Amino acid sequence: VQDIEDLAVLMFRGPLWQWKGVAGPVGEGRYEWETRLPEPGRYRVLLKSRSHGIAFGDLPAFHVRAEAEPLAEHGTCSMGEDGSGELK
């Protein structure tokens, strides 16, 4: 389904963490959202759209896996001839 303007997202991991937000259309029936997850692991995702009569749980849930970020995601590491290292 394309151009759903009220696509709500419910993400949760176990009984202690959940997040609700809204996904925005990016074209061709695809949607995206941003959130910060508290830790690496598997998260369950449910969707709803009031304008389309879809409640959380009406559609099959899906899962996403979050992995830890590398320590120097945007940095570079170089090694000198004497074995010393530098992280930028």
Image (cartoon, rainbow, N blue to C red):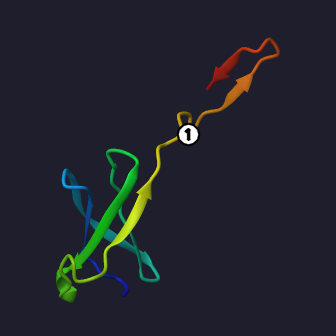
Query: Who's the residue at 37% across and 85% down the image?
Result: 2
Depicted 9 relative to depicted 88: above or below: below
Please state which of residues 11 and 33 is positioned toward the viewer in this rendering: 11
Q: From the image, tell me which residue sits under label 1.
A: 73
Category of crowding for the residue at label 1, using alpha-carbon neighbours closer than 10 angstroms: few (below 14), some (14–19), many (at least 20)? few
At a point 57% along the width and 38% down the height, the residue shown is: 74
| Residue 56 drawn at (x, y percent) | 20, 76
> Where residue 64 sits in the image (x, y, percent)?
41, 63
Location of residue 7 (image quadrant): bottom left
Where's the N terminus, which quadrant?
A: bottom left
On the picture, is 71 further left or further right than 84?
A: left
Residue occupying the far right of the picture: 81
Q: Residue at x 22, y 88 (%)?
A: 52
Task: Say what secondary structure mark 1 lies in.
Answer: loop
Number of dots carrying numbers: 1
Residue 22 located left or right of residue 29: left
For residue 63, above or below residue 49: above
Whether residue 19 is situated above or below residue 70 in the rendered picture: below
Identity of the residue drawn at 54% across and 39% down:
70
- The outermost residue toward the front is 14
Left/right of residue 43 with respect to residue 21 in the rendered view = right
From the top left corner, tell me how far across and down residue 47 is, in percent. 27, 74
Q: Quadrant of residue 76?
A: top right
Q: Quadrant of the C terminus?
A: top right
Residue 16 percent location from the top left of the image? 19, 50
Q: Amino acid at mark 1?
A: Glu
